[in-house]
Amino acid sequence: MDEIINGYPAVLIHAHEAPCLSLYQPTHRRHPENRQDPIRFRNLVKVLKDSLGKKYSKQYIQALLKPFRVLARDPDFWNHTLDGLAVLAAPGMFRVYRFQRPVPELAVVADSFHTKPLLRILQSADRYQFLGLNRREVKLFEGNRDALDEVELAQGVPRTITEALGEELTEPHLTVASYGMGAGRTPMRHGHGSKKDEVDKDTEKFFRAIDRSVLEHHSRPSGLPLILAALPEYHALFRQVSRNPFLMAQGIDIYPDSLPIDALRERAWQVFAPQYHARLDGLVEAFGEARAKGLGAEELGEVAKAAAARRVATLLIDADRHVPGRMDPRTGRVEFDGLAHPEVDDLLDDLEELVLKKGDQVVVVPAERMPTGTGIAAIYRF
């Protein structure tokens, strides 16, 4: 399974030989709902096949679709899906992504990949990470307002205090001595140094190791806010040693094992929701101010030309809108058409890629939060 954080830049930035196949579908985590998922997948593969048939030979199509058919017959894969699926393929490339939220069904063949659903999930304003911590072990979760799942810790992140400290893990230094005891009497054990002091030192070392490794392997690569979930006595110590700029000021005073996963998600969302709403409100307000100054636009043809000239500083795109057509990335000229054609993609998706490739900001916004009715809102730099 491909990691979206590491795989998405390669999908977007690097050129791929056409045809580029993009397949998206909602999936289900549990039986019996997930029994229909491979059937729906095969139907979407047929859509790809029919589109390819308008331009390519049967032999070429068969080779290109072979990994799709292998995936369709993999029962282990279909028994371990999440809420959404994306499969991107081109000559010499095949990538599979699983999502924590449903995606609209789509199967399209074009000269480039359809990546808007990937982008929405990658940089969605409602995603966060959730660090469960006590003095013995650590767990990491990733979630949004709809789902929370434990994620596998990256290689290099210790799972337990023993794994983190190894031979540095201290124990109380005990000696055994007899003081005025006769034969057969139980000797008294005396510790040199406080057991609590030793435990506190180990806990601090463990927390430092966790903080460093989570920052390096999870927070920086994802850019996601981090919510700390721990018993109250561990919050102060972890925040004292932490150097993670993604760590949120508010956390949850409980270790994750104490609650079911849905209850954890609800607690995490209560912490994260204010930041989520503030970010979206800020983007909408910035667009309104820019439009009042003549530095904001919502008409697709106009924005496409501005993007080609690198005038677009920030682009807001409706997460659920599709506008079939082609765009010339050199001039921004747009031409409307149908998605069934093997060289046609979503114009909003093409516009997103053009802005990103020029190094500017794109934010995919839920439809109900968009400040325009056209599917786009652009803030110009000049």
Image (cartoon, helix red, strand yellow):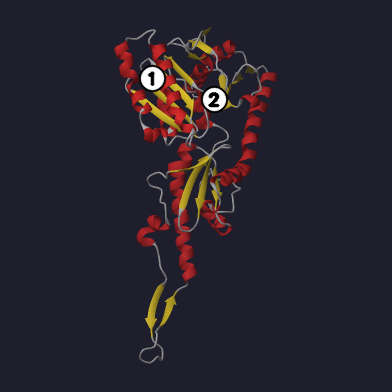
Q: Is residue 134 visible?
A: yes
When asked about the image quadrant of residue 77, the answer is top left
Count of labels shown? 2
Q: Is residue 242 visible?
A: no
Residue furthest front in the image: 32
Q: Position of residue 130 (x, y in %)?
A: 53, 45
Secondary element at tag 1: loop
Classify mark 1: residues with Cα within 10 Å, few (<14), some (14-19) or many (20+). few
Q: State the residue position of label 1.
A: 15
Residue drawn at x 57%, y 46% is: 264
**Is 215 displayed left or right of 71 in the figure?**
right
Amino acid type, residue under disc 2 in the picture = Val
Q: Dividing the image into 4 quarters, which one contains the N terminus?
A: top left
Instruction: Give the vertical position of 185 relative to 236 (above or below).
Output: below
In the image, residue 235 lies at what x, y percent? 56, 55
In front here: 300 or 295?
A: 300
The spot of residue 137 in percent (x, y) is: 45, 55
Residue toward you, 23 or 315: 23
Percent position (x, y) of residue 127? 54, 36
Above or below, 37 relative to 229: above
Amino acid type of the residue tagged 1 in the rendering: Ala
Label drawn at residue 173:
none
- Of the two numbered discs 1 and 2 on the same chain, state the one appearing first in sequence: 1
Residue designated by label 2: 362
Instruction: Tell me the quarter of the picture where residue 189 sits.
Output: bottom left
Nearest the viewer among 22 and 286 is 22
